[in-house]
Image (spheres, rainbow, N blue to C red):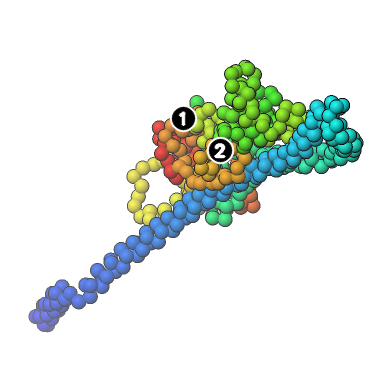
């Protein structure tokens, strides 16, 4: 019995060994393991490509939002400049028609008073004066009196008041018009927040949103205050002003008939040089000054200009450009820098955790504040005067918009503006735009970490590092 059991055990042991040997030699199905590994790799690669494409598309959308917002705002500003130019021309037409009538009357009056009464022995002159005496008296008491007492006040002056009010309204309203257009365009292209620099009003966004007014201090408290924390205190405005406010024109040389009519009919192509030369020649009595003044006021003598000033006052003033001596200041006044932001809370949340199979080898407190969980875009556009050989002015409606680099070498340094200061100015308006776009003030708290992130980023953009940024 014992020998049978031993034989049976040896047989089972030898059978198992043979089976294991055959199983070890059998390589069928090995490709399945390689296939599973390959599928896993392809799946991971597909996920990465899909997420990368999605991130790229979202980033391009935000940049497109910045580009369209900046260009649209510049286009609004250029349109406003053209409207001011058209209104200047309309003013000039009204004043010119009024002055022409008055000039014709004064010319006729001067001829009549200089000619009549004539030499009694000159029968032809006596007859002519007798005929014109009735005409002169009838015109003086009739048509000229209506022109002087009624038409000037009820028609010419009222037209000028309406045009002048339109220009003042355009000047005051355009900053908010441009800002609203930028925010609207950014929102239509997927941005959650958007704003521009300079900001449109000194009083800031509406005060009924406490989170908006407090966002600047909240962000700075989170990052920490430093001597770098500054504000530009610049307010968006068109680079224009009433001619009487131009320090380059002395008192008396700012009315429509003087710097509105003269250059168009003289050999001067530059309005400022023309007025400066004419005034200098007139005030100093220089040799040849009469030639300058003849070119300046060949259509309307002094009595006509005085009459128009008395009749129209400030409403007869044209608007002119504000031309600073520093080109970088002019660039700042004629351009707008736009920031756009799109809130994507899963960007560094679920999307990042999807690939978090490796353990972190670092520890960072408040890590989310050092990584943007959304997308940021930046763009800048400007108004451009397409006047050919002409210097920019408000007499030719040839203003248009074009894109430009965010910062040219030395540009921001010359005007004393840093990117962090720009961001500090924009913060309340970014928050306000987020409420307008999303319809909820909760977007401010949801995006707070990203607003802090951008505060750190803009502090790193000093004068040397910001130069040459295109986007």
Does residue 431 appear anywhere in the picture?
no
For the residue pair 399 and 349, the one nearer the viewer reads as 399
Q: Quadrant of the N terminus?
A: bottom left
Q: Residue at x 47, y 41 (%)?
A: 406
Q: Quadrant of the C terminus?
A: top left
What residue is shown with label 1? 413
Circle 2 packing at 10 Å, graded few (<14), some (14-19), many (20+), is many
Q: Tell me residue 172's x, y (percent).
A: 68, 39
Q: Residue at x 11, y 82 (%)?
A: 4
Identify the mark at residue 392; answer none if there is no mark. 2
For the residue pair 118 and 164, the one nearer the viewer reads as 118
Above-or-below relation of 307 to 43? above
For the residue pair 149 and 27, the one nearer the viewer reads as 149
From mark 2 to mark 1, how far is it between C-alphas? 25 Å
Does residue 52 appear anywhere in the picture?
yes
Mark closer to the chain start, 2 or 1: 2
**SS category of the residue bearing label 2:** loop
């Amino acid at each position: 019995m014992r020998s049978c059991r031993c034989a049976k055990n040896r047989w089972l042991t030898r059978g198992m060994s043979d089976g294991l040997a055959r199983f070890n030699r059998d390589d069928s199905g090995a490709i399945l393991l390689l296939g599973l590994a390959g599928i896993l790799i392809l799946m991971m690669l597909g996920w990465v490509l899909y997420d990368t494409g999605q991130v790229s598309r979202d980033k391009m959308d935000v940049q497109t939002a910045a580009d369209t917002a900046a260009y649209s705002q510049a286009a609004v500003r250029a349109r406003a400049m053209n409207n001011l130019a058209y209104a200047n021309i309309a003013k000039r037409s009204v004043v010119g028609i009024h002055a022409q009538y008055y000039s014709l009357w004064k010319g006729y009056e001067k001829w009549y008073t200089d000619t009549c009464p004539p030499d009694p022995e000159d029968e032809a002159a006596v007859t002519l004066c007798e005929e014109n005496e009735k005409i002169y008296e009838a015109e003086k008491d009739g048509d000229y009196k209506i022109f002087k007492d009624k038409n000037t006040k009820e028609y010419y002056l009222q037209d000028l008041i309406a045009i002048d009010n339109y220009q003042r309204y355009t000047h005051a309203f355009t900053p908010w018009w441009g800002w609203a257009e930028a925010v609207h365009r950014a929102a239509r292209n997927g941005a959650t927040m958007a704003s521009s620099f300079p900001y449109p009003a000194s009083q800031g966004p509406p005060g009924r949103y406490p989170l908006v007014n407090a966002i600047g201090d909240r962000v700075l408290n989170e990052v920490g205050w430093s001597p770098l924390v500054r504000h530009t205190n610049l307010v968006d405005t068109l680079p224009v002003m009433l001619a009487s406010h131009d320090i380059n024109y002395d008192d008396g040389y700012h009315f429509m008939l003087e710097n509105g009519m003269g250059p168009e009919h003289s050999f001067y192509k530059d309005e400022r040089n023309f007025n400066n030369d004419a005034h200098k020649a007139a005030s100093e009595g220089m040799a040849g000054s009469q030639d300058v003044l003849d070119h300046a006021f060949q259509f309307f003598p002094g009595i006509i200009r005085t009459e128009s000033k008395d009749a129209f006052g400030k409403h007869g003033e044209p608007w002119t450009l504000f031309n600073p001596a520093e080109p970088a200041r002019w660039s700042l006044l004629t351009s707008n820098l736009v920031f756009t932001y799109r809130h994507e809370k899963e960007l560094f949340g679920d999307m990042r955790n999807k690939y978090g199979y490796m353990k972190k080898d670092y520890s960072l407190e408040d890590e989310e504040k050092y990584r943007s969980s959304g997308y940021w875009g930046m763009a800048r556009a400007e108004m451009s005067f397409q006047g050919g050989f002409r210097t920019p002015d408000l007499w030719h409606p040839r203003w248009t918009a074009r894109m430009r680099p965010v910062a040219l070498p030395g540009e921001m340094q010359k005007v004393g503006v840093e990117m962090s200061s720009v961001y500090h100015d924009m913060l309340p308006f970014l928050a306000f735009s987020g409420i307008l776009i999303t319809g909820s003030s909760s977007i401010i708290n949801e995006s707070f970490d990203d607003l802090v992130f951008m505060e750190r980023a803009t502090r790193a953009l000093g004068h040397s590092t910001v130069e040459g940024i295109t986007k």
